[in-house]
Amino acid sequence: MAIETTKDSICINQIIGQKNESIVVEGDSIIPDIKPDILNAIHTSGTVCIYKKEILDGKVRIDGSIDAYIIYLADDENNTVRSMNSSIDFTEVIEMNAITPDMVLDTNFELKSIECRVLNGRKISIKAILDIELKISANEQLEMIQNVNLKDIQLLNKDFNIHLLIGNGETKVYAKDTVMIDDADELAEIMKTNVKIMNKETKISYNKVLAKADMYVNLLYLTTDNRISSVETNIPIMGFIDIPNITDDNICDLNYEIKNILIKPNNVEDHSIYVEVEVQIYCHIYKNQELNVIQDLYSPSKKLLFTQRQVKVMQQKEMMQGTYNIRENQMIQELKGNKIYDVTVQVDIQRQTLLNDRVLYEGEVHFDFIYASPGNGIDTKTVILPFSYQMDFKGVNTNSNIDTHVEILSQDFIVTADDSVDIKVDLRFIASMSKNTSLNIIEDIQEEESDMVTYSMVIYFAKPDDSLWKIAKKFGSTVEEIARVNGIDPGDKLVLGKQLFIPRYYG
């Protein structure tokens, strides 16, 4: 016979699975007919573009490309420096157990390395290493029992502080601008692009999420008279995502992904380059909620059977940011007396140590210099600096789950009078903390025919892992009655072998 209960309905964001994959993206490209043969590659860079992501039964499919720029030494009479752009498409299918198309997918992509190999004068091979982080969650509406309508029911409750997913959405935005170059420069070709999203801001108001950021664009280009120059700009981007029933007290988790890049000489206006970047913004909104959940139950007078299900949920969702300033003076022999055209900065976190209320990051910062060279006209040099940065983060401990991403806020490189290089770089560490915990949800309670033994008092000796609750449930008594009869506190920890008098309880 079913027991009458009172239930509450809650939406649980259940963590189904997490996975990190490192994949190889490679492909061959032909040098365009309008460009000279390639002798050797000087520098290769790339940007990750994600066209499509989808969850299938038991797997995740990702379609995208690596938008690569190759600066090379041409096989011509003057050994001039030229460049080409190539897009290498990829499709990756990643197996993950127990996932279905109705679940929610969170991703993060990082291009770890890219290189170019010359196959012959008209053909090159590009190989990139791409790191992918996947997190799959499921929004599930649960009916959770809050009260049992039975006179002598004994309940074991536990308080949980969890983060409930109250909404999610996405929007597509475009960063578009015409970037002006020097009037004295007649553009021949674009040699390298550096595109990244910076200065991210979020605001929640009137059931909308306002996402603002800057699209940083740095372009290295070649002029018709074989000079190399560069230009940079910040293009503001902004998008609104409608999510009902949200407030500014909620936690907003945003993720930006570049989908497509179009950078080309502007045919309408002289001395300018047209830039268009398509960006998809994904948003998840969480709220902090206290839950009092029944973990176990019994009745001293009735035999009860119940079904219980375990679900994984998120706890302690917090965000923290910190800035690390690099101020170094380096004597780089190759750069002496030479002009720096461009510097690519990449941060490699090699170790993350969780301490009490602190996170310690250790790793390396890679600086890839492109500079003027008397021999080839252009050359590259990589400088690696180790770093150690400690960020305060209240609530962090060794059991926390921390995801960290690093943004380059600003960078400046100045060749000083003694030919050394002053390096000034500001890094923003953005850390997201969460802890996964399990909730035991009681879903159904039935009363069965009782075969309970009747007694007035039992003498019992405590065994390993015993608690007053376990003993009371076993003998159909109550924690309060056992504590009263034995003169102990209900919260006391039992000593192995302790003699206890177990009274029979009648409601």
Image (cartoon, rainbow, N blue to C red):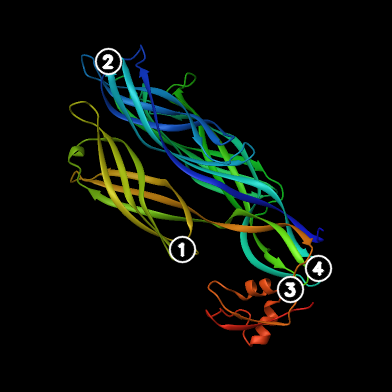
Is 43 on the left-hand or right-hand side of 402?
A: left
Which callout, 1 or 2, points at the residue further toward the start of the chain?
2
Is 124 on the left-hand or right-hand side of 255?
A: left
Looking at the figure, which quarter contains the C terminus? bottom right
Whether tag 3 and tag 1 are in contact, CB under 8 A, the answer is no
Which callout, 3 or 1, points at the residue further toward the start of the chain?
1
Which quadrant of the structure image shows residue 229?
top left
Q: What residue did someone put label 2 on? A: 121
Q: In the image, residue 82 lies at what x, y percent?
A: 30, 21
Measure the C-alpha gap from mark 3 to mark 2: 91 Å
Vertical order, 8 against 467 (above or below): above
Viewer-side label of 4, 2: 4
Measure the C-alpha gap from mark 3 to mark 1: 48 Å
Is disc 4 placed on a helix, strand or loop? loop
**Residue at x-position 37% and y-position 27%:** 69
Total numbered labels: 4
* Pick the front one: 345 or 396: 396
Question: Can residue 236 be seen from the camera position used here?
Answer: yes
Q: Residues within 10 Å of mark 3 (few under 14, many from 20)?
A: few
Q: What residue did someone put label 4 on? A: 150
Q: What residue did someone put label 3 on? A: 453
Which callout, 1 or 4, points at the residue further toward the start of the chain?
4
Q: What residue did someone put label 1 on? A: 397
Measure the C-alpha gap from mark 1 to mark 2: 56 Å
Residue type, label 3 = Val
**Residue at x-position 38% and y-position 28%:** 182
Is disc 1 placed on a helix, strand or loop? loop
Residue type, label 1 = Asn
Is 111 on the left-hand or right-hand side of 304?
A: left
Q: Residues within 10 Å of mark 1 (few under 14, many from 20)?
A: some
Viewer-side label of 3, 1: 3
